[in-house]
Amino acid sequence: MENDSKEKLVKRLTLVVTHQCNFDCRYCLQKHEDVSMTRQTAIKAIDAFISGICEGDKAQISFYGGEPLLQKELIKELVRYSSEKIFSIPDTRLSFEITTNGLLLDEDFIAFSKKNKILLALSHDGLAQDPVRTDCGGHMTKELVDQKLQMLLKTFPETIIMMTVHPEYVDRMGESLKFFHEKGVKSVSMVPAHGERVVWDDAAFEKLEREMEKAEALYEQWNAGDDVFRFIPFDNKIKNYIRSRDADSLMCHFGCHKLMVDADGKYYPCSHFIGRDGFGIGSLDEGVNEEKIESLQSKRVEAEDCKGCALRFRCRHTCACSNHGHTGSLSEVSAFQCEYEKLVIRLADRAAALLLNESNPAFVFRMYRN
């Protein structure tokens, strides 16, 4: 098990190229400081990462922020450098990933991304964009980001939308999915906002349940026949069940699956914990602190209430960042998260029961392909 963890550490790298952001989202937990990664730090991180890549490996480098495209020119340089550096290792595949709020996207960077195999995901909250995701001056952003979305879809028709649902605007979720579908989007990832800036009370959860039921109906409609629409919460639950995969072992990157290097060269177990006291796991100068990783992992114990649950292997109840965001503990699962997981599993299973048949070949292929 220890060897597996070490192997995964050097397969995926995330560089926090800046803490700065040009947005002021109402649920964001990051401190948007005037701090950015230097070229020297970035090169050092990439060199250390590539030194652990072997023949035949698949590797991925992600650029994270703040808003990563505030460091657009640095990213271009690092993509070129990484690609040249790894070229000498036979049969190695290197890809890149950026999640952006979209405001700084332009035709030049989109063309660069296509040429260099950069997966661009767009953060967009649909019809809740304007009240929730203003820019730093308090201005609405939806109209501008909608334009960027259309620009992006021309080159990347499979662009993934990263939608966060705020409890005050949860009743816009279903209509937001319709909005994205009408724009030509085929993939939407959705998470409920969490952390100390948001509160999910019973009334908000009831609205979420109604909106998720609308999402289920749309999912069934838009995956009929040869049509394709990926609503990632449902897709993941169905795929993981079919392939007998534990949800958290696949989705939670805490500590060992994806090494995250902050702008100052310090290592953190995942994005939620950047800069938080007690969650550093080493640095570029000191290397990975295996004892610290093991110490943090030891705190991820399964809650007693979860051990007898029939859904425990389909539920993200041991996801460290989700638990910490809701309860402040790596192990304690919030009542909201528990009910949300049950809701998603129930609706995903209901959709799968309807769609998994020969009349929906695209859906069946998507769920069963390796």
Image (spheres, rainbow, N blue to C red):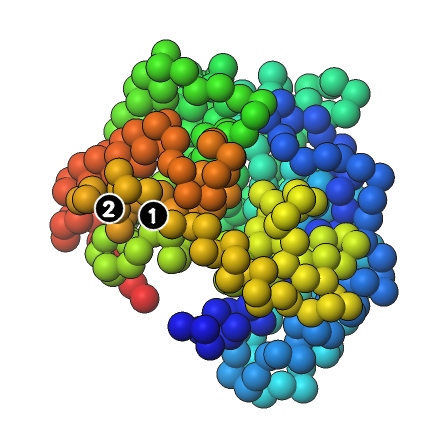
Residue at 24% from the left image edge and 46% from the top image edge:
307
Q: Quadrant of residue 219?
A: top left
- Please name whichever residue, 236 or 281, is drawn nearer the observer in this view of the structure: 281
Q: What amino acid type is highlighted by mark number 2?
A: Lys
Q: What amino acid type is highlighted by mark number 1?
A: Glu
- Please name whichever residue, 347 or 310, is drawn nearer the observer in this view of the structure: 310
Q: Quadrant of residue 133?
A: top right
Report the side of 11 relative to 358 (left or right): right
- Please name whichever residue, 352 or 168, is drawn nearer the observer in this view of the structure: 168
Q: How many marks?
A: 2
Where does label 1 land, which residue? 302
Could you tell me which secondary element the residue under label 1 belongs to?
Answer: loop
Marks 2/1: CA distance?
Answer: 7 Å
Residue 169 position in % (x across, y down): 49, 17
Q: Quadrant of the C terminus?
A: bottom left
Residue at 43% from the left image edge and 50% from the top image edge:
300
Crowding near the residue tagged with mark 2, few <14, some 14–19, many ≥20 C-alpha atoms within 10 Å: few
Report the side of 260 relative to 315 (left or right): right
Residue 153 position in % (x across, y down): 56, 44
Residue at 58% from the left image edge and 54% from the top image edge:
269
Are circles 2 and 1 on residues that touch, CB within 8 Å?
Answer: yes
Q: Quadrant of residue 323?
A: top left
Residue 72 visible in this rendered orientation of the protein: no
Q: Is residue 247 above or below residue 33?
A: below
Crowding near the residue tagged with mark 1, few <14, some 14–19, many ≥20 C-alpha atoms within 10 Å: some
Q: Earlier in the sequence, mark 2 or mark 1?
A: 1
Could you tell me which secondary element the residue under label 2 belongs to?
Answer: helix
Report the side of 208 relative to 368 (left or right): right
Can you tell which mark lies on residue 307? Answer: 2
Residue 17 position in % (x across, y down): 75, 52
